[in-house]
Amino acid sequence: MSATAYTPAIVPTPTALRTTIAYTAVYVIWGSTYLVIKLVSQHGAFVMAAARFLVAGVLLLAIARWQGVLRRTDFTTRSWTHAAIVGACLMLLGNGGVAIATGTIDSGIVALMTAITPLWLVGFDGLMHRSHRQSKWVWLGIALGFAGVAVLKLDSIGDTNAVSTAGVFVMLVATLGWALGSVWSKRPGGAHSPVTATAMQMLAGGAVLAVASIPKELAFHDEWTLLAHNPPTLTTLWQWSYLVVLGSLCGFTAYIWLLRNQPAVRVATYAYVNPVVAILLGWLLLSEPIGMRTIYASALMLGGVGVIQLARGRKMLSFRAPISAE
């Protein structure tokens, strides 16, 4: 370490207006991305997602260079391997799974199911720290969360709209992938700057999505063939741009800023607001029904996450919970 004395910088107190704008961005923008993903994915789920993250990654690199946090030493084999693992989990399994699931499940239900991600994180925490015994409240939260998933498949609760079994399974894999990526992103080996690290993860994840679209195309003809027969319209391009600029860039920037300037417990409330926003937008714009099944499942899943959050406190909140448009 250098012998030079370090004088901490004076950090200005964030204004109420800026804080309100940041929360609005995380609440509304991220909550709305599920609906937009559903619309854009009709032209090829993996292809459109790959293009989105590749473009967003390049833009983030430009932002990192403009901020002066881009270093040549960040681009090593180790850091790219780290970014590829995280990108594959978050972008391919996580966001790719969301894109696929929206083809068979209402966008609001997809957003709701992302709330079970903390349940996987609890399991990973138990595997990595076997000495940490989970309390009965944590186990109650886990039980409530997965009971909410089970409710989605019940047929005798006054809701005749069946939920696709395949879609539910894909979302279980997607939330598992997002949890894995969140855990791995905490490991050393990535770029020193969060902006640079995220840009590399988006670029690597976009590349993995592009490669994965090839076997998916060969098996189902629903990627490049779908894109050729159903090319994006001007409206679709505007929707895709919304995901790139507002979802991936503005939403992520607001989220990082809030984590640095607000209590983690307060920032984590987006895990509860996003599904509500997605369900309401799906009902308003796509006429997706809100039946008793959705209400019961919402109460169980969000209640389970709430119990875990209260039981584990700030420790659990160090992870990024639901799958977002990051």
Image (tube, rainbow, N blue to C red):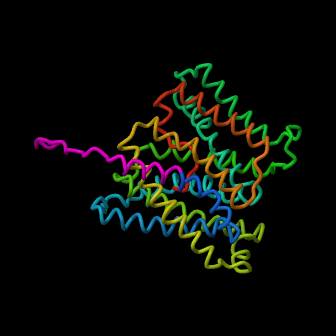
Q: Could you tell me residue 21's position as x and y percent?
A: 42, 53
Q: Quadrant of residue 64?
A: bottom left
Horizontal relation, residue 121 to residue 3: left or right: right
Question: What count of labels does the image hold?
Answer: 0
Q: Considering the image in quadrants, where does the N terminus appear?
A: top left
Q: Residue at x 48, y 54 (%)?
A: 25
Q: Position of residue 272 (x, y in %)?
A: 58, 41
Q: Position of residue 114 (x, y in %)?
A: 63, 45
Q: Nearer the viewer, residue 242 or 158?
A: 158
Q: Camera-side residue: 27 or 45?
A: 27
Magenta span covers which residues?
A: 1-27
Residue 298's place in the image compared with 105, above or below, is above
Q: Vertical placement of 184 versus 195: above or below?
A: above
Residue in view at x 88 percent, y 41 percent:
155
Q: Residue at x 68, y 47 (%)?
A: 173
Q: Is residue 297 left or right of residue 209?
A: right
- Residue located 60% across and 25% down the image: 138
Taking depth in this image into account, of 294 and 257 the one nearest to the observer is 294
Residue 48, image quadrant: bottom right
Query: Does the magenta run of residues contain 21?
Result: yes
Relative to 171, say whether 149 is above or below: above
